[in-house]
Image (cartoon, grey):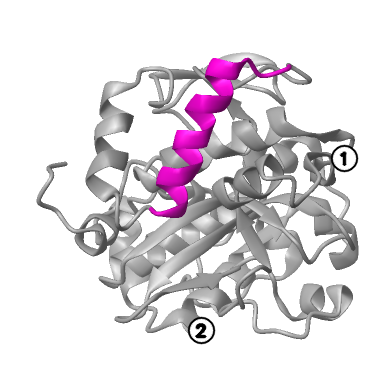
Amino acid sequence: MNGYESPVDFYTRPGQMTSAGPHAAALAALKGVGAVAAAVHGTLLHDAWAQQYDQVLTPERRAQSHTRPARAILDTIMAIDPAPFDIPRPPDKRSIGTCRNFTVLACAALKAQGVPARARCGFGMYFEAGKGIDHWITEYWDGERWVSADFQIDDLQRAALKLDFDPLDQPPGKFLSAGETWQRCRAGAADPGKFGIFDESGFWFIAMNLVRDFAALNNMDMLPWDNWGAMPQPEEEISPDGLARFDRLAALTVDADQRFGELQALYQDDAGLRVPAQVFNGVRQQMENVGGA
């Protein structure tokens, strides 16, 4: 990383989590956003949506959602069914993941084609009325702008959610980045208690996603339940110093392209924000090596 690299160049290059390794050529053969979406839909199954696809997940299948690098996700997909990546698998032959796995795999595929892409962590406004649900999407550069694309939403989910927009080119406000959400809530324009997942919500939750989004903007796309460094504890009341720190983080992530050098420098300089060699997996309640699956 250096101060002279443009955001477009930086996000074209695969990161630790979006490198496809030996699968890069297969991903590069997928031509265009629609082909990437079809391939991702045909190889992954969201654990929270499994029942809608008539799948009862075993613990072994659920464990696949903890896989971090795209290369390892692709290894799992091919171990289940070695068919070419663009051949749709039936639901019982798909690898299990969350919105983040769909996002990371889409980013890996787009980058393999030379398309700038980045993961964003925040909140989807189209899952529950009046609420922002913990969510990840992909932004890709179409040559003129960053397009917000949700590669998780297939035809079944689109119908179930009654979406009236294209998930692969979302209008503003359908997905709010963690920084946008933080700023709205800090300004009193939104209720922090409406942003989270299950029974967890509030400023502490938004701040955790803010650190994850900041890491993703630095090409480190972690699991939705990976915890480290400056993240608050659940239900923690954030100190004035903490609020100021997250205010700055929100401003940087919302204005990432214009303040790209500052965003990268802060990631390098602040050990509390940078992803360490080990993180705490909040679901498994254990420390795990970032380099592993």
- Can you identify the residue that label 2 sits on? 34
Q: Residue at x 81, y 45 (%)?
A: 191
Q: Is residue 78 above or below residue 240?
A: below
- Is 238 within the magenta? yes
Picture quadrant of residue 269: top left
Q: Of the residues shown, which amino acid type is indicated by label 1?
A: Phe
For label 1, count other residues whose C-alpha is less than 10 Å away and answer few (under 14), some (14-19) or many (20+).
Answer: few
Label 2 sits on a secondary structure element that is: helix
Can residue 24 be spotted in the picture? Answer: yes
Query: Where is residue 275 shown, x and y percent of the image?
Result: 41, 26
Q: Of the residues shown, which amino acid type is indicated by label 2?
A: Gly
Total numbered badges shown on the rendered structure: 2
- Could you say which disc has been placed on residue 198 in the image? 1
Picture quadrant of residue 140: bottom left
Query: Where is residue 60 shown, x and y percent of the image?
Result: 72, 37
Mark 1 or 2, nearer chain start: 2
Which residue in the rendered view is the most extreme toward the front? 187
In this picture, residue 277 sits left or right of residue 154: left
Query: Where is residue 198 shown, x and y percent of the image?
Result: 87, 40
- Is 216 within the magenta? no
Can residue 78 be spotted in the picture? Answer: no
Q: Residue at x 48, y 58 (%)?
A: 105
Q: Which residue is drawn at 50% across and 62% down?
A: 138
For label 2, count other residues whose C-alpha is less than 10 Å away and answer few (under 14), some (14-19) or many (20+).
Answer: few
- Could you say which disc has been placed on residue 16 in the image? none
Q: Which stretch did the figure color magenta? A: 237-255
